[in-house]
Amino acid sequence: MEITLKGDREFDQIPSLKTKALRINLNENIYGTFAEIGAGQETVRQFFRAGGASGTIAKAMSAYDKDFSDAIYGIEDDKRYVTEARLRKMLIHEINLIEQRLIREKHPNKLYFSYANTVATIDFAKKYKGHGWVGIRYQIDPNEKEYNEIILHIRFKENDARLQQETLGILGTNLIYGAFYKYNEPKKLLRYLYDHLDKDQLEIDTINFSGPVFEDVDNRLMSLQLVKNGMTDAVMFAPDGNNVLPAAVLYKRNILALRGSFRPVTKVNMDMFKKSYDMFIKENKVDEEKTQVVFEITLSNLRAEGEIDEQDFMDRAKLLCSLGQTVLISNFQEYYKLVEYFSQYTKSRMGLAMGVNNLVDIFDEKYYRHLSGGILEAFGKLFFKDLRVYLYPMQNDDGTITNSENLKVHPRMKELYKFFKYNGKVVDISDYNMSNLTVFSRTVLKMINEGEDGWEAMLPEGVSKLIKEKSLFGCETEEVFRDE
């Protein structure tokens, strides 16, 4: 059963919330339940107000009391209720009830759905602004055996619980409408989640699509859209390719981050990672069991001629995931912003692994002109935290090595640099592989694009094979097969 939406937002006005809810209500086949916990029943209220809801809403509930909620959806071992796991239990439970209580033979054309959210709004002291999980499990074909699912995590930015509730109701309506009428254009569906909302009201930092209609959707690419559209400053995805909640991955962890273009990931990247990791876990404040490594790519590193090359992004993502790495895509051009971001989730020791050129850039005043306190303000945010920089050396044209002992910064920054160096904020990676100092991503990429031989030796084991098999970075598959 095909559900289509005529027109396009570039030419049509944005539908009002009432129009969206009414269109769902007047579709005689869309039928389901609303289960909302923690912020009232704000989404279903939009559908009741629009009129004609009796043909759409099978049930609306809010099991606000934890004992009642446990009796319906089960007990959470960790006693945490605003989680993705809790949301999934709610969605599955409610869909199962619909299937048990409605005989399919009597309703052959019904498109079942369950919408749910579990949310914590701002606390009384206004210390924690609140967050939540929102999702929908639904059909667009009554004969589908598997359900489609869209699950997202939100962070509230408003400082009033009532406003947050209203924002949640708007988002929920947009999600349900988009799920049924924009499922075939997930990028637009994402943008339309902010209809009648401002980015100052709400942040969406995680979203995952699954099910038959999203079979060809790569959640890493959807993750990129969140940052690209300004919905969040950073997103994270796991080695399996699914987006993960940064707070869940980083909470109270020691964090070692490596920033790079990884275009493609080379032996020098992996050597930098392994050697810095070995040094990091030996620090007296670092617990290896609670350490998280993050490979970070900034949005500026993804731009080519002013636009983000999505295929190029996917090529990098596939390689990093194949190496078992957790990847952060951020909008943080300056390192201090990255450290500030991590500091939201942990007070434990952090490490940054980087090359000489990156550290020299950090001491360049031009990057901090927008700050009232200039470079001193940035360094206060960067080095005031329990942070250490692990510096990978650089080989110069004359064969000499540049490291933390002899690198040159601007004369005005020399004493400042010596201060941080003396206090152990910058340490050298000494046990490095000399042969890697002549390996550069841009050289490898140029060799791949021009069909030259020998680039395989500059990459970690298995990476060149994957590049050939998947024709990544413009690698000519036919030529590779002929060479082999």
Image (cartoon, rainbow, N blue to C red):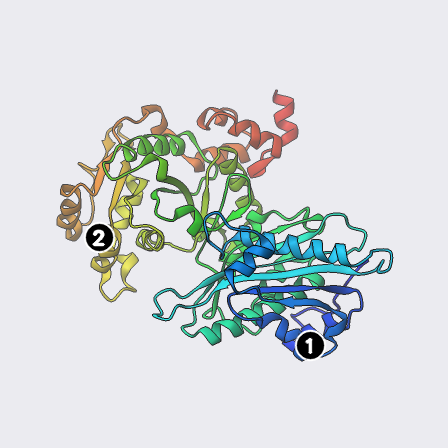
In depth, the one of 452 and 103 nearer the eye is 103
In depth, the one of 224 and 36 nearer the eye is 36
Would residue 466 appear left or right of 280 to someone viewing this image?
A: right
Q: Quadrant of residue 61?
A: bottom right
Mark 2 secondary-structure assignment: loop
Please give the name of the residue rendered at 35% of the width and 24% of the height, measured from the top-left corner: 435
Check disc 1 and report the residue beneath it: 19
Rendered-image quadrant of the C terminus: top right
Would residue 434 appear left or right of 108 to someone viewing this image?
A: left
In depth, the one of 426 and 358 nearer the eye is 426
Q: Is residue 14 visible?
A: no
Check disc 2 and report the residue beneath it: 384
Q: Disc 2 residue type?
A: Phe
Q: Disc 1 residue type?
A: Thr
In depth, the one of 374 and 349 nearer the eye is 349
- Give the percent coordinates (x, y) of residue 170: 58, 71
- Give the percent coordinates (x, y) of residue 100: 75, 54
